[in-house]
Image (cartoon, rainbow, N blue to C red):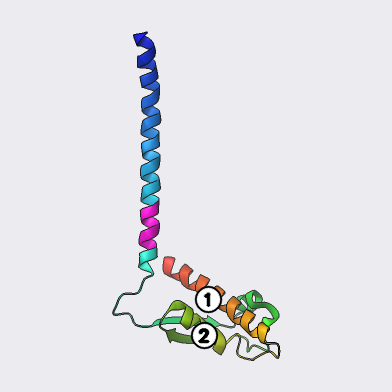
Amino acid sequence: MGEIWWSLLGAAIPVVVAGQAFRVKKRRAEEQRLQSARGRERSSDEIFVCERVCTSKRMLKKVGSFSKDPIPDTCVTVCGVSDLDACADACARTVCINQHQVPNWNDICLRRCQSECLKLSSQSQSS
């Protein structure tokens, strides 16, 4: 009977150790994720965020036909109080500069351009 308990205990120990290792790994991954998110926060001495938006082929493809008569291969760098503000202003000055007669198209153009700008911004900061 004692042999059975020792064998059960011998089998349980690796399971407990593996479970603990899994929890530690999961906790470290969560801490890493939170730390990288904190890296994007602005410190008190950083007042402005600058974003550069270009009417590249990639950007125009992402925005689609919602940008009306864009001027190809032009770029603008705009600073704002947040990533979103800077991207919105830069998009309005380059990709979505010419207004459509259908107002909804202008909103869609700005949303798509902002989304792409923010993606590119987060990729460049994580690199």
Residue contact at pointers 1 and 2, CB within 8 angstroms: yes
Q: Which residues are magenta?
A: 30-36
Name the N-terminal-most of marks 1 and 2.
Answer: 2
Q: Nearer the viewer, residue 120 or 89?
A: 89
Tag 1 residue: 117
In the image, residue 99 lies at what x, y percent? 65, 91
Rendered image quadrant of residue 80: bottom left
Quadrant housing the C terminus:
bottom left
The amino acid on which the numbered mark 2 sits, given as a three-letter code, is Ala
- Report the residue that reaches farthest toward the left: 45
In the image, residue 88 lies at what x, y percent? 52, 83
Quadrant housing the N terminus:
top left
In the image, residue 116 lies at what x, y percent? 56, 74
Tag 2 residue: 90
**Residue 40 visible here:** yes
Q: Residue at x 50, y 81 (%)?
A: 87
Q: Residue at x 60, y 90 (%)?
A: 97
Type of secondary structure dominating the magenta stretch: helix
In the image, residue 36 lies at what x, y percent? 38, 62
The amino acid on which the numbered mark 1 sits, given as a three-letter code, is Cys
Is 34 one of the magenta-colored residues?
Answer: yes
Few, some or many C-alpha atoms within 10 Å of disc 2 (few <14, some 14-19, many ≥20)? many
Q: Residue at x 37, y 56 (%)?
A: 32
Vertical order, 91 against 125 (above or below): below
Few, some or many C-alpha atoms within 10 Å of disc 1 (few <14, some 14-19, many ≥20)? many
Q: Secondary structure at mark 2?
A: helix
Is 56 one of the magenta-colored residues?
Answer: no
Q: Secondary structure at mark 1?
A: helix
